[in-house]
Image (tube, coloured by chain):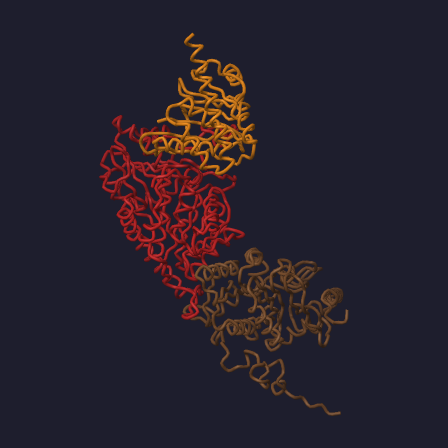
């Protein structure tokens, strides 16, 4: 049933349909609406046999999830920004112990200066924490990704972040179709933990590993991560078959003419400028690029759906022979360029691609269609540099206008 | 595509108004989207929210820069000058005020603005019927009375779903009165024009 | 008059768990089939009272839970010496996550068991004073105020012994540690700092709070058993002398725990819902020097100029004796 829903509501209801055993919650903008909605469902019984725990910090939120997952429950929490950093130690720990927790990250900037609005700095700071990172292009995908994330995480024994742009998606209202509860039950296998704190078969979890075994432990974790791409792709295909729409996957391909997402879209061609992006800016690009295409500009769009594991092979396949690559990056590696650009560059090493890093939308700066069109034109005529800050106001720090998210070009 | 921008103050239900407008648009068969422009502003601070209607799925996440419609829930925002920024030529403006078009244009320094400017005492109506300065439902009804892409019935349905019980009924009553007010004003204006 | 020394071993005393008592009155430790939750082969130092106390606490808890106990352990000596991969000295299902989160991990386990309808399995969390009083306090406090069904046990050896004896907020005044050296005009840990975790726990009004030492096995076991008979958040604070950190003889750990109690320095008590309900009276009062002198961390108190500090120690003991009526009759 298609309905009008706020992104956070859509995510909360979908998570509920995944039947978590323990949900732990700590408020931080812009994630708050998700755990608020889940708290209501916990009271109404819609969450079923689930414990909803209000904790005293994000660090404890992840720690409660660790305990719950180790005790055999499907565990879920949500956070953003400073909260993700506050729980960072436990985030790494959950991955190291192979606990398939699913966490929504409502992507938000990291201070200082304190900023509650969207960019990808938070999740990027934990890109090597051993978690899967799946990025939603829109609210439909944000909801759907949670079903895929539980399935993938539990098959692999690797925790998964579902990343959705804070405010831009979490607080936006769209026409959506939630995964039906019965269909989710049929799709998502029950959680069968590979290790569990069981009094009948006692085990020790979380031992110390010395120099003689630590490298091998990490190598095994690495091998498991290498399996992840195939597992993500497999569950995403199954999701398409079961629910009739695309979500997740490794790389999102878009039709050359319409810019609509299509698994079967051809690879980019030599002479194409290909825009690579991640998250909700893909929607704005879908709206902005067809006009360029109609004007004869050879432009293609490729989305990165899975940032961890990074789908180097699938990205190379989608980029085809295109060698002018514009990466729209919502996080900055200081002194270097966009964070996503670094991974794209590594995937394209040796291909003689011209990669442009366009840092955009930091701290909630709206990314405008006209600005994106301008970037593509500049890439085509050779005036776009290796690193560009979209809509950068030069001449010092501007005096804020009324309403911090006012749009200026 | 129709793009609507709603201006108000924190606590007036600006974000709720945009979401309800999207729901009403969906009932009318449109693809819809509502985007709040969230700040860390507290009660009373200027707040903006956006709504889009279209025939095809809405992909863009850009804020509404060039609205076809501007709804202003608080006339004290007019003086700040930016509420009509980017308004499409011939666009529609609805202002929640007991004043008239001339006063609105004067307050906004927009005497020459190429727009249809309507006024409706939405807050006054809502205060009388609901007892609270929450003019969202009345403003949406005023929009329904002056545009062809949303019906009053859709607005009433959405309002009753959003606010069950007596609050919803009071909001619905305010919406009906605001709708009738705008329709009468437009009829009167048409008579003046035709006379 | 001639005095005959009879070894405690033969008297059926408190010290050896009452092996001469009737079977149902004996301690868990006196039984040959005790659970040995922390089993042999671990790497604790000689004379480690934490290892001893942890085994006694967990054996009693396992016994009280009918063998159905899950344990969450904070980072610290207890974790490091018991679980160096690929070995584990723990018999119950046991998890170590991080330094600061044992209480929260335990909450997660308890929540999971509740969601699964498993009311037959009990949850115990444990950590040292660093993981409890310092870095883990927020998680412990959160677990307390939510009244989660967890027994949290703090083995207090009064410092960061695992990292080489640094000061914690449980380090006693004037104690020398690696970060409060015995140099300058106010050697060792400053007077007036530190906090009472027992009183912090009581302030949360959790159903049960108790303190104990390994000098009194029967009391320790009784408190664990009482704690396990109650649901909700419970707290047990066990003083565990550390030969390495305290600079004491490994053979003196139990004696030091006893003199800490008998001097009035470590009150042994029980509280329910924030109200003090029982206090162990001092049986044979000793001076604070009996507790302090065998510990090298206090050696500077027994050099010229240390008298002031000893007086302040006596004042601390007096304050405890007054506050908790440790001599009785008040």
Visible residue check, residue A335: no
In this image, A1 relative to C255: left or right? left
Q: Position of residue C184 (x, y in %)?
A: 69, 60
Q: Quadrant of the N terminus of chain A?
A: top left
Residue placed farthest to the bottom in the image? C2
Q: Please report the residue visible at 48 percent of the width from the left and 75 percent of the height from the top.
A: C39
Residue placed farthest to the right in the image? C330
Query: Which hue belongs to chain C?
Result: brown
Q: Position of residue A227 (x, y in %)?
A: 30, 55
Q: Position of residue C329 (x, y in %)?
A: 77, 71
Q: Quadrant of the C terminus of chain A?
A: top left
Q: State which quadrant residue C8 falls in.
A: bottom right
Chain red in the figure, letter = A
Q: Position of residue B195 (x, y in %)?
A: 43, 7
In this image, A270 relative to C185: left or right? left
Q: Vertically, is C330 above or below C145?
A: below
Q: Vertically, is C107 above or below B87?
A: below
In this image, A221 relative to C91: left or right? left
Q: Vertically, is A234 above or below C185?
A: above
| Viewer-proximal residue among C205 and A196 | C205
Chain orange in the figure, letter = B
Q: Please report the residue visible at 28 percent of the width from the left and 39 percent of the height from the top.
A: A261
| Viewer-proximal residue among B145 and C12 | B145
């Amino acid at each position: 049933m298609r309905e009008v829903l706020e992104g956070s509501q859509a995510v909360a209801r979908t998570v509920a349909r995944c039947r978590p055993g323990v949900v732990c919650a700590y408020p931080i903008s812009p994630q708050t609406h998700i755990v608020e909605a889940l708290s209501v469902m916990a009271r109404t019984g819609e969450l079923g046999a689930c414990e909803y725990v209000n904790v005293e910090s994000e660090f404890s939120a992840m720690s409660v999830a660790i305990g719950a997952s180790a005790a055999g429950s499907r565990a879920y929490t949500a956070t953003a920004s400073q909260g993700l950093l506050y729980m960072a130690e436990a985030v790494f720990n959950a991955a190291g112990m192979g606990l398939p927790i699913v966490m929504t990250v409502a992507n938000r900037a990291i201070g200082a200066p304190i900023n509650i609005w969207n960019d990808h700095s938070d999740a990027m700071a934990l890109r090597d924490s051993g978690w899967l990172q799946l990025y939603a292009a829109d609210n439909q995908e944000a909801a759907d990704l949670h079903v895929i994330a539980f399935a993938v995480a539990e098959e692999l024994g690797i925790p998964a972040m579902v990343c959705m742009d804070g405010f831009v998606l979490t607080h936006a209202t769209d026409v959506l179709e939630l995964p039906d509860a019965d269909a989710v039950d049929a799709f998502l296998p029950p959680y069968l933990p590979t290790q569990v704190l069981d009094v009948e078969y006692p085990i020790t979890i979380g031992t110390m590993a010395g120099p003689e075994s630590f490298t091998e432990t990490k190598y095994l974790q690495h091998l498991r991560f290498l399996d992840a791409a195939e597992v993500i792709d497999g569950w995403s295909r199954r999701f398409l078959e079961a629910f009739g729409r695309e979500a997740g996957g490794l790389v999102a391909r878009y039709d050359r003419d319409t810019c609509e997402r299509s698994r079967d879209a051809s690879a980019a061609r030599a002479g194409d400028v290909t825009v690579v992006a991640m998250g909700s800016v893909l929607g704005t690009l879908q709206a902005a690029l067809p006009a360029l295409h109609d004007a004869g500009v050879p432009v293609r769009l490729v989305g990165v759906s899975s940032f961890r594991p990074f789908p180097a092979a699938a990205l190379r396949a989608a980029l085809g022979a295109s060698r002018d690559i514009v990466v729209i990056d919502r996080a900055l590696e200081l002194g270097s360029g966009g964070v996503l650009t670094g991974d794209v560059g590594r995937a394209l090493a040796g291909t003689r691609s011209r990669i442009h890093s366009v840092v955009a939308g930091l701290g909630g700066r709206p990314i405008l269609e006209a600005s994106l069109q301008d970037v593509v034109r500049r890439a085509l005529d050779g005036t776009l540099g290796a690193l560009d800050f979209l809509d950068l106001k030069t001449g010092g720090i501007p005096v804020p206008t009324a309403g911090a998210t006012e749009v200026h070009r | 595509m129709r793009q609507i921008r709603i201006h108000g103050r924190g606590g007036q239900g600006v974000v709720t108004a945009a979401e309800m407008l999207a729901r009403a648009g969906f009932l009318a068969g449109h693809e819809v989207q509502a985007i709040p422009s969230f700040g860390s502003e507290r009660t009373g601070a200027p707040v903006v929210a956006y709504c889009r209607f279209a025939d095809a799925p809405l992909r863009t996440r850009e804020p509404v820069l060039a609205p076809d419609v501007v709804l202003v829930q608080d006339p004290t925002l007019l003086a700040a000058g930016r509420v009509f920024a980017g308004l499409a030529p011939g666009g529609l403006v609805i202002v929640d005020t007991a004043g008239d078009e001339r006063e609105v244009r004067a307050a906004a320094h927009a005497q020459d603005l190429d727009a249809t400017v309507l006024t409706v005492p939405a807050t006054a109506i809502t205060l009388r019927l609901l007892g609270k300065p929450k003019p969202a439902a009345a403003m949406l009804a005023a929009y329904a009375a002056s545009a062809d892409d949303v019906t009053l019935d859709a607005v009433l349905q959405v309002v009753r779903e959003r606010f069950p019980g007596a609050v919803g009924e009071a909001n619905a009553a305010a919406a009906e009165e605001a709708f009738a007010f705008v329709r009468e004003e437009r009829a009167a204006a048409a008579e003046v024009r035709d006379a | 008059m001639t005095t005959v020394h009879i070894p405690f071993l033969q008297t059926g005393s408190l010290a050896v768990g009452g092996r001469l008592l009737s079977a149902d009155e004996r301690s868990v430790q006196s039984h040959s089939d005790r659970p040995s939750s922390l089993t042999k082969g671990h790497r604790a130092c000689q004379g480690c009272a934490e290892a001893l106390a942890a085994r006694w606490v967990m054996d009693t808890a396992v016994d009280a839970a009918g063998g159905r106990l899950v344990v969450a352990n904070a980072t610290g000596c207890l974790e490091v010496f018991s679980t160096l991969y690929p070995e584990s000295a723990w018999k119950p299902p046991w998890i170590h996550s991080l330094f600061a989160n044992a209480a929260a991990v335990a909450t997660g386990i308890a929540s999971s068991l509740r969601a699964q309808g498993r009311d037959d399995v009990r949850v115990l969390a444990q950590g040292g004073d660093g993981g409890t009083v310092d870095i883990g306090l927020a998680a412990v406090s959160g677990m307390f105020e939510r009244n989660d069904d967890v027994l949290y046990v703090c083995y207090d050896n009064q410092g960061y012994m695992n990292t080489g004896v640094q000061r914690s907020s449980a380090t006693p005044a004037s104690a020398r540690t690696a970060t409060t050296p015995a140099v300058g005009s106010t050697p060792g840990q400053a007077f007036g700092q530190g906090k009472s975790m027992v009183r912090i726990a009581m302030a949360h009004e959790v159903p049960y709070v108790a303190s104990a030492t390994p000098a009194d096995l029967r009391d320790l076991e009784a408190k664990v058993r009482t704690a396990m008979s109650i649901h909700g958040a419970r707290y047990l604070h066990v003083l565990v002398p550390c030969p390495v950190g305290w600079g004491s003889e490994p053979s003196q750990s139990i004696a030091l725990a006893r003199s800490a109690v008998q001097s009035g320095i470590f009150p042994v008590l029980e509280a329910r819902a924030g109200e003090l309900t029982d206090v162990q009276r001092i049986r044979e009062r000793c001076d604070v020097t009996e507790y302090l002198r065998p510990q090298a961390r206090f050696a500077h108190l027994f050099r010229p100029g240390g008298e002031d500090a000893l007086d302040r120690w006596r004042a601390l003991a007096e304050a405890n004796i007054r506050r908790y009526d440790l001599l009785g009759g008040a």
